[in-house]
Amino acid sequence: MSEQSRPAEDASGATGPLTGIRVLDISTLFAGPLAATFLGDFGADVIKIEHPAKPDASRGHGPAKNGVNLWWKTLGRNKRAATINLGAPAGAELLLALVAEADVLIENFRPGTLERWGLGPEQLHAVNPRLVIARVTAFGQVGPYSGRPGFGSLAEAMSGFAALTGEPDGPPTLPPFGLADGIAALATSYAIMVALRAVETGGTGQGGTGQVIDMAIIEPILMLLGGQITAYDQLGTVQKRTGNRSVNNAPRNVYRTADGDWVAVSTSSQSIAERVLRLVGRPELVDESWFASGHTRAEHADELDGAVSTWIGARTTSEVLTAFEQAQAAVAPVYDVRGILADPQYAALETVRTIDDDELGAIKMQNVLFRLSGTPGDIRWAGRPHGRDTDEVLEQVGVTRKQLAALREKGVI
């Protein structure tokens, strides 16, 4: 936390574990803003800063109701919404005034953009040496691709994810949502917490100063894809597409029930694999020598899938789930959003919350990411309209109402 005098609560009255941490979110679309959302969910005072005439493009993504974007209600939750034209000299001055009282700044402009506006790390740290600056870009701040435009879909392609996803005889497959962006957002929020800890303890070896986080979206998803780099380095192997199957265990697939639903079965542990095959009436396969490891079971996936699919296909979804539960074998229904909202496990975890919203009334959305026993997070409000809190945010750093009117007339806010 910066040394500036700060109220015990943020502007929303939050009392979460990150209360007192002020975050300036000047990023757009998904990875940067979602990282800020994760911080806001646990009490950080997040100020979302957008261009006065060009709002965050995520406000236009996905479905809307009565002209109100629905994805923004989740992505923009727990954030105060202000507008500043950072490319205008007067706008840059306003940001520097906010930086003086902030702990974190998250941005995702192309490398060199902030420097061109006089808002590079050198200028920001001159105003606030303890500031943590998270720079989230597709390709990072250095290298031959650093200046290219890029989105999460490119990271999903370059990381090897798309090459591994899809049927063996089909094309590489991209996910229908921002997977790489979401993974990068989680990594960014983690990096920010590490950097804030270093400020607190002096762990940088520089007397507790802030530092710059260089987050390339192409990297976190690559880490989650496992040991493919080491395997290629040591064995020369290149993992191929296997559809819903795995090269590490079998049976592992989705299977259709008698009433037309789908269920997923996984047998990552040996004991679960044995239970599944005994349940489906093929105990003799357990005694085969190749059944003793997941890798060799995967070589017999056709036979194992045939046994499981035949048994599941003759039974209703309810019968399948009940039988697997009784056998202590791993199974899950394949849900769309309707199944999620009706599922008793999600209900018990309170995974979905209903929030009162000024624009839409009662709306449902995902809850905070995890449960803390002593200092839980909270959703204080859903995403706010563009520029809703501009005056309040700028008045807190000494901008008068007369100055606000002049800045608004010039298009700076």
Image: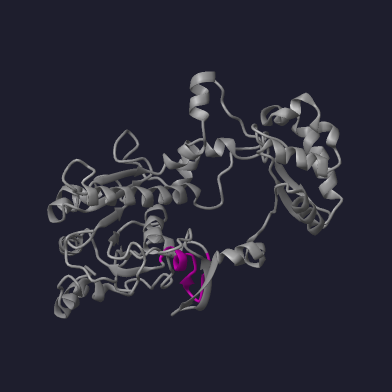
Quick one: 386 or 253, which is closer to the camera?
A: 253
Query: Looking at this rendering, what residue extends furthest in the left direction?
Result: 126
Q: Quadrant of residue 216?
A: top left
Residue drawn at x 14%, y 73% as measured from the top left: 398
Q: Is residue 67 magenta?
A: yes
Say which quarter of the image contains residue 163: top right
The answer to whether any part of residue 108 appears in the image is no
Quarter of the image containing the C terminus?
bottom left
Examine the structure image and report whether residue 195 is included in the region drawn in magenta: no
Residue sitting farthest toward the front: 374
Q: Position of residue 109 (x, y in %)?
A: 30, 50
Compare residues 128 and 85 and report the one nearer the observer: 128
Residue beneath the point at 49% across and 40% down: 224
- Foreground: 146 or 105? 105
Q: Does the image show residue 237?
A: yes
Question: Which residues, given as a range, are shown in magenta?
Answer: 63-76
Instruction: Give the colour scheme of this rendering.
Output: one colour
> How many numbered callouts?
0
Image position, residue 178 (x, y; %): 49, 51
Left or right of residue 284: residue 210 = left
Residue under the point 37% across and 49% down:
190
Vertical position of residue 299 compared to residue 153: above or below: above
Q: Position of residue 159 (x, y in %)?
A: 48, 37
Q: In the drawing, does residue 4 fall left or right of residue 316?
A: left
Image spot of residue 348 (x, y percent): 60, 66
Work out which residue is located at the far top of the displayed protein and give it: 235
Task: Work out whether 236 lies above or below 88.
Answer: above
Between 253 and 86, the residue placed more toward the observer is: 253
Question: In the rendered view, would you say 93 is above or below 268?
Answer: below
Quarter occupied by residue 280: top right
Which quadrant of the rendered structure holds the N terminus?
bottom left
- 207 horizontally vs 321: left or right: left
